[in-house]
Image: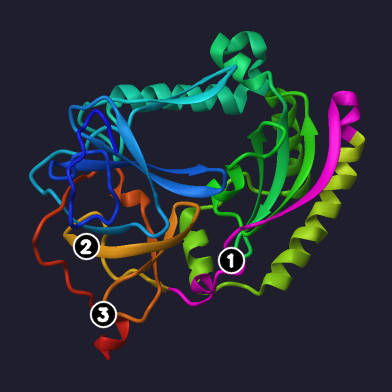
Amino acid sequence: MNSAFGWVPNPHLNTEMGINTDSVFYLAAVQWQSEKPFLEFRVHGHQTSESEKANGLQMKFRIVADQQRRCIGTIERSKDGTISVQCDLPAVTARQCERCQTKDNIAAANMHQAHRRGRESINKAMAEYLTHPHRLYLAIFRDGSIKVGTTRGSSGGNRLVEQGAWYANYLAQVDDGFIVRELEDLLTQELGISQAVDTRKKFAGHLQPLENQYLDDRLDQLSNETQKILAKEIGNRGVLLGERWSNPRLEDLMWSDLVAYPAAINQGAHEFTIKSMVGRLAGCKRNGFEENFLLDLQPLVAHPLETGDFDVDEFVMQDSLF
């Protein structure tokens, strides 16, 4: 594999990564492409990155304690969609430099308030991004939390797998991102449906999940209520859908028996193999343990990592405390 980094074989990563993992490197993002998870890695000082398939990726690394976290950059939106813009400055927040965080905060405010502010009150690139068909969806997670959300495009894209939803219904497709956010707000006002679910709830739901049938029935019940409201409001601005979606991991046995990863991923030394992912949460195995571990990869993002011959941190399982 060729890249700007120059490939160097590394016995501690079981993939032929194009980046030089004998140097300090960083996890920049968890990405989904065609409903398959990838991890984006970068090396400080280089302008390119490399995405590796997450499923089956074996990693042995440690946090480099005496080096700074690096900014992961920003996302730019236009009529053609989104692109990632890299940054190599030190991170002053968890993942970004001050400039990139400010830029993303302004973009998020423009996007989520666009339907209230009006097309003329946001920048041209964001307006062009929103002037594109959007879908409205209702998603349920394994703890029973439900959210209403939006996604750009006529197919739904990767939004639901990125979110880590377990089941979802596409409720409607409308002409643009302004209309879809009006309808999203309407469902929140009329039915009290949240527009966000905390990752801690998603995580807890995988450890103690509700029955799939209950989740399915609950989603159908609320979807029927939303359709009554949308039928009165959508008019000629779009169409009702009623299209069902299920997470690809629904039949994956790993996700039926998980325990929390018993260590802080953003400090110390670790070794594990990612077997599959739901959103940014990874189902992992570690040599010497029978358990399937559930791990949130987000706290690892932007931290300096290195591989090599070193001892990894020991696990202290909860049973061993009693």
Locate the N terminus and report the quarter of the image it occupies.
top left
Separation of residues labelled 1 and 3 (CA atoms):
30 Å
* Residue 85 pos. (x, y %): 37, 23
In the picture as drawn, the residue positioned furthest to the front comes out as 1
Picture quadrant of residue 316: bottom left
Badge count:
3
- How far separated are the C-alphas under marks 2 and 3? 13 Å
| Most foreground residue, 179 or 151 | 151
Q: Amino acid at mark 3?
A: Gly
Q: Position of residue 206 (x, y in %)?
A: 51, 68
Secondary-structure class at tag 3: loop
Q: Which residues are magenta?
A: 233-258
Q: Quadrant of residue 248?
A: bottom right
Closer to viewer: mark 2 or mark 1: 2
Q: Cβ–Cβ below 8 Å for labels 1 and 3? A: no
Amino acid at dot 2: His
Side of 208 where 310 appears, left or right: left
Find out whether residue 243 is within the magenta segment.
Answer: yes
Q: Are marks 2 and 3 in contact (CB under 8 Å)?
A: no
Quadrant assignment for the C terminus: bottom left
Other residues around mark 3 within 10 Å, as few (<14) / some (14–19) / many (≥20): few
* Residue at (51% x, 61% y) in the render: 201
Which residue corresponds to mark 2? 270
Q: Residue at x 62, y 14 (%)?
A: 128
| Residue 123 visible in the current orientation | no
Q: Residues within 10 Å of mark 2 (few under 14, many from 20)?
A: many
Q: Which residue is mark 1?
A: 143
Of callouts 1 and 3, which one flags the residue occurring earlier in the amino acid sequence?
1
- Judging by the rendered image, the residue that carries numbered circle 3 is 288
Q: Residue at x 44, y 57 (%)?
A: 281
